[in-house]
Image: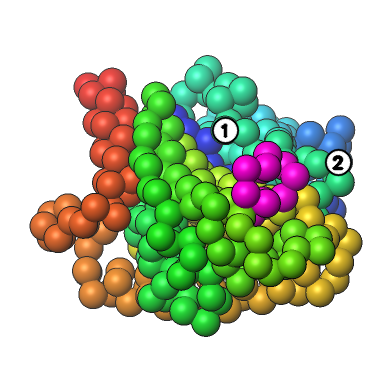
Amino acid sequence: MFLRNAWYMAGWAREIDGAMLARRIADTPVVVYRREDGQPAALHDRCPHRFAPLSRGRLEGGVIECGYHGLRFDAGGKCVGNPHGDGRIPQAAQVQAFPLVEKYTLLWIWFGDPARADPSTIPDFSFLDDPGRGRVDGYLHVQANYLLETDNLLDLSHTQFVHPNFHFSEAILQGRHEVTQAGDTVHSNLWCPNGAASPMFAKRIPGYDGRSPVDQWMDMRWDPPCLLRLDTGITPAGRPREEGGQSFTAHILTPETETSTHYFFAHSRNFRVGDADMDEAIAHWQRVGFGEQDKPMLEAVQQAMGTTDLMSLKPVLLPIDTAAVRARRIVRHLLEAEEGAKR
Ligand code: FES
Ligand SMILES: [Fe+2]
């Protein structure tokens, strides 16, 4: 079961430049594309005649022509052309349209009440709009429920076991961990002041001597149901964060089905911008760390659980689970509120 009154990332805005994008999101097949005026639009990817995916059709002038028998639909889902017989348009020839906006270079879709689809409630990912920052992004298809991926990201202590070869564990994991909640937003922050530089972060400070004490942090922000932003960095001890090497990473976990997730990530940095070696080091971390270490572990966990209801299995809970448990509780309350409102 998925929240309906929530913004989900449907894809990168660039994915619909000149093409239709077909993607299953929250168990709903959608086709996303640009209208003639360039504005993005989303329709249920299912023709009401014989249920052909509209994404197999043709997009022309912002109108989709079904690839099976040629019914034509506008961005509101209204049938605007029938090439058969007298051309009369049957009343039931209507496709569901979903609110979709482009913001922070991402596409956001809403499956709930359209009257409640307010783009100003999308959490802040404005760092992705800043052309002065260095960006490395990517996508993984993960065969696991999105909340398992959320658990993983809200507990970064897993890095020392799942990612031992990346060497950022020793220094930074001795830090002070604090979990706080503001409204439905959870913060899971790790603060490591006045210590030795983690090898993973040391190269972020230009001209760093490798010995002077530094402040380091890893701050994760989570918003329901699946939107995370990681703020990590290193700065000379006592100096403002912006003076050091700081990165923000969007980790966005769009559920595909109950047991599969579209994992979008975008790393954005203020250091060594335009440096191809740095780009490659980050891409390597995403490829190996996320793709070859986190993903197989999460898929194995999903297989071993055999269900998506973690709590029904009565898992052992550790202090490191605090943020993830809060996030799960918030999602459950929001789902219950939605279900209650339907009755
Ligand atoms: S299935 Fe689309 S027009 Fe027939
Ligand atoms: Fe990880």
Asked if the stretch drawn in magenta spans residue 234, the answer is yes
Report the magenta residues as a range.
233-244
Q: Nearer the viewer, residue 134 or 42?
A: 134
Secondary element at image label 1: loop
Residue drawn at 38 percent across, 67 percent down: 158
Residue drawn at 23 percent across, 24 percent down: 340
Give the image location of residue 312, x and y in percent. 13, 54
Task: Look at mark 2 in the image and give the residue it sits on.
Answer: 61
Give the residue type that dot 2 points to.
Gly
Residue 133 in sight here: yes
Tell me the tag on residue 246.
none
Give the image location of residue 326, x and y in percent. 29, 40
Secondary element at image label 2: loop
Give the image location of residue 24, x and y in percent. 52, 55
Give the residue type that dot 1 points to.
Pro
Mark 2 close to ligand 1, CB under 8 Å: no
Tell me the tag on residue 123.
1
Residue 86 in sight here: no
Left or right: 204 as drawn, with respect to 159: right
Task: Find residue 212 and report its image quarter.
Answer: bottom right
Tell me which numbered mark, 1 or 2, is placed earlier along the sequence: 2
Quarter of the image where the N terminus is located: top left
